[in-house]
Image (cartoon, coloured by chain):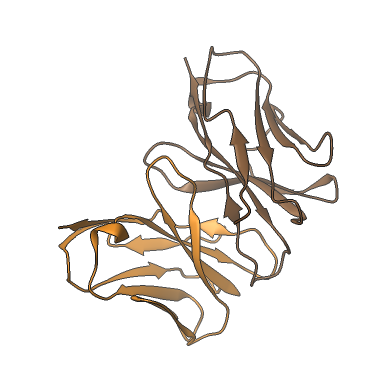
């Protein structure tokens, strides 16, 4: 069964450093997403991406965050200057379509720890 | 902002028991999805419901979407230890991105 692949599975970084989280969505999917889940809290929407541009972003997704699809297969999330409160599981997801009957396929996540 | 609440927050039961978990909102959703998440993994889609009053069955799991499309329930018959996990509901309103509830953490003891 097709999978969404995320790398790395764990990332430890010092506060203020830049990190790039990588995702390979399912090949025939057109809609891409980043969500995060702080330990013990709910899954929170960060950003959606379609047709090589951001289609929607949340209040969490401020100027420190950016997304890119550099080569037609990878989908990356960059955090420019990490803060302690950025520590969370970051999930990439993709969907074949955007209508209600299409569910998300999530990756296994990247656990980001900012120290 | 549309918010989803889930209850109970935690549920611990014995193998073979039946259970129901709930997802509620004051807002109407055009569609609602249920996911199960295991520790260290991403959520896995179980079902999507789009019609008020709709009932879907997935083996021992029965999902219902409320008539007013503001609530949903998940009923598990004869729970097994393999059903242990965090059950998340997520709602969307006509093309907007899905908003997740906080989840119900289910533990099924052998």
- Image location of residue B38, percent across then percent down: 38, 49
Task: Give the answer, above or below, for where A79 lies relative to B105.
Answer: above
- Image location of residue B67, percent across then percent down: 47, 86
Q: Going by the image, does B18 lie left or right of A53? A: left
- Identify which residue is drawn at 45% across, 44% down: B41
Label tally: 0
* Colour-to-chain, brown: A
Foreground residue, B100 or B38? B38
- Identify which residue is drawn at 53% across, 38% down: A109
- Identify which residue is drawn at 55% across, 57% down: B99
Chain B as rendered: colour? orange
Q: Quadrant for the N terminus of chain B, please.
A: bottom right
Task: Give the answer, above or below, for where B99 lies relative to B94.
Answer: above
- Identify which residue is drawn at 42% across, 39% down: B40
- Image location of residue A2, percent across then percent down: 63, 54
Q: Going by the image, does A23 lie left or right of A30? A: left
Where on the picture, by quarter, is residue A68?
Answer: top right
């Amino acid at each position: 069964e097709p999978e969404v692949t995320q790398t790395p599975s764990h990332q430890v970084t010092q506060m203020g450093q830049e990190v790039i989280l990588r995702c390979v969505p399912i090949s025939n999917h057109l809609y891409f997403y980043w969500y995060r889940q702080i330990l013990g809290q709910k899954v929170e929407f960060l950003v959606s991406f379609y047709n090589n541009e951001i289609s929607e972003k949340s209040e969490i997704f401020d100027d420190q965050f950016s997304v890119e699809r550099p080569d037609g297969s990878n989908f990356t999330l960059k955090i420019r200057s990490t803060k302690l409160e950025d520590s969370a599981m970051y999930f990439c997801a993709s969907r074949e379509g955007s209508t209600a009957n299409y569910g998300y396929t999530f990756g296994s996540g990247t656990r980001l720890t900012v120290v | 902002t549309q918010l989803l609440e889930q209850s109970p927050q935690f549920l611990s039961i014995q193998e073979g028991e039946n259970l129901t978990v709930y997802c509620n909102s004051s807002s109407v959703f055009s569609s609602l999805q249920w996911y199960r998440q295991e520790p260290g993994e991403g959520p896995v889609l179980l079902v999507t419901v789009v019609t008020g009053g709709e009932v879907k069955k997935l083996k021992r799991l029965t999902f219902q979407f409320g008539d007013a499309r503001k609530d949903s329930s998940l009923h598990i018959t004869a729970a097994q230890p393999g059903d242990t996990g965090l059950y998340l509901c997520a709602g969307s309103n006509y093309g907007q991105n899905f908003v997740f509830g906080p989840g119900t953490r289910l533990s099924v003891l052998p």
